[in-house]
Image (tube, rainbow, N blue to C red):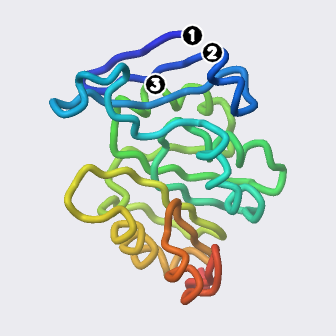
């Protein structure tokens, strides 16, 4: 349907037969061009709203109620799903990339339940307590994503009752009590 390019990044909105195979009439992809991927049609896919990707966020959509902290806005899929629930009364989103906020957040800014905070979720000084948190940051750094999600879980453990993270290892989830694990009493 279209492409929005900013720096090395691009948001692609697609329609077509290949999309219909996953059960949707369109799909959005966030990608970036790097030296290693510039010969690929869309570069490196960082995130997408495909059925497979969306299914990884089911735990937060099915469980969340009250106040929710989201680390990483991305394409807005998690926020969109939470706003569809009348059990969620407040959402705080932390996003470090101003360009992502500028392109994605306008869809949500009219809903009084949602607020976005520009900053690094590992460093931002954000006061408050939440019932639920979902960590879904992206990194191209050497440090593994799961370790960064673990750092976020540790950072917010005293202010969030239940936390989960996209792609968190099954063993770690089991050791901590499941997809969502209690992490404190805010």
Point out the residue furthest to the top here.
1
Residue 96 x, y percent position in the rendering: 34, 45
Vertical relation: 57 (above or below) 116:
below
Packing grade of label 2 (10 A; few <14, some 14-19, many >=20) is some
Residue at the bottom extreme? 175
Q: Quadrant of residue 18?
A: top right
Q: From the image, which quarter does the C terminus lie in?
A: bottom right
What is the C-alpha distance between the residues marked 2 and 1? Answer: 6 Å
Place residue 60 in its image quadrant.
bottom right
On residue 52, the disc is none
Q: Secondary structure at mark 2?
A: loop
Q: Secondary structure at mark 3?
A: helix
Q: What's the mark number on residue 15?
A: 2
Q: Residues within 10 Å of mark 3 (few under 14, many from 20)?
A: few
Q: Nearer the viewer, residue 181 or 122?
A: 181
Q: Viewer-proximal residue, 8 or 24? A: 24
Q: What residue is pinned by disc 3?
A: 103
Q: Residue at x 55, y 89 (%)?
A: 175
Contact between labelled residues 3 and 2, with CB atoms less than 8 Å apart: no
Q: Residue at x 22, y 55 (%)?
A: 141
Which residue occupies the extreme right position in the image? Answer: 86
The answer to whether residue 83 is left or right of residue 166 is right
């Amino acid at each position: 349907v279209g492409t929005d390019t900013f720096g090395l990044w691009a948001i692609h909105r697609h329609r077509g037969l290949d999309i219909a195979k996953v059960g949707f009439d369109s799909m959005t992809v966030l990608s970036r061009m790097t030296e290693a991927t510039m010969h690929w049609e869309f570069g490196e896919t960082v995130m997408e709203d495909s059925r497979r990707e969306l299914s990884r966020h089911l735990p937060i959509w099915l469980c969340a109620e009250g106040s929710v902290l989201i680390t990483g806005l991305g394409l807005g899929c998690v926020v969109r799903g939470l706003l569809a629930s009348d059990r969620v009364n407040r959402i705080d989103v932390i996003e470090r990339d101003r360009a992502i906020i500028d392109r994605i957040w306008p869809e949500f800014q009219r809903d009084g339940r949602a607020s976005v905070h520009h900053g690094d979720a590992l460093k931002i000084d954000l006061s408050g307590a939440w019932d639920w948190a979902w960590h879904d940051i992206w990194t191209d750094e050497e440090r593994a994503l799961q370790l960064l999600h673990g750092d976020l879980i540790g950072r917010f453990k005293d202010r969030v009752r239940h936390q989960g993270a996209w792609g968190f290892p099954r063993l770690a989830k089991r050791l901590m009590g499941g997809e969502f694990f209690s992490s404190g009493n805010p």
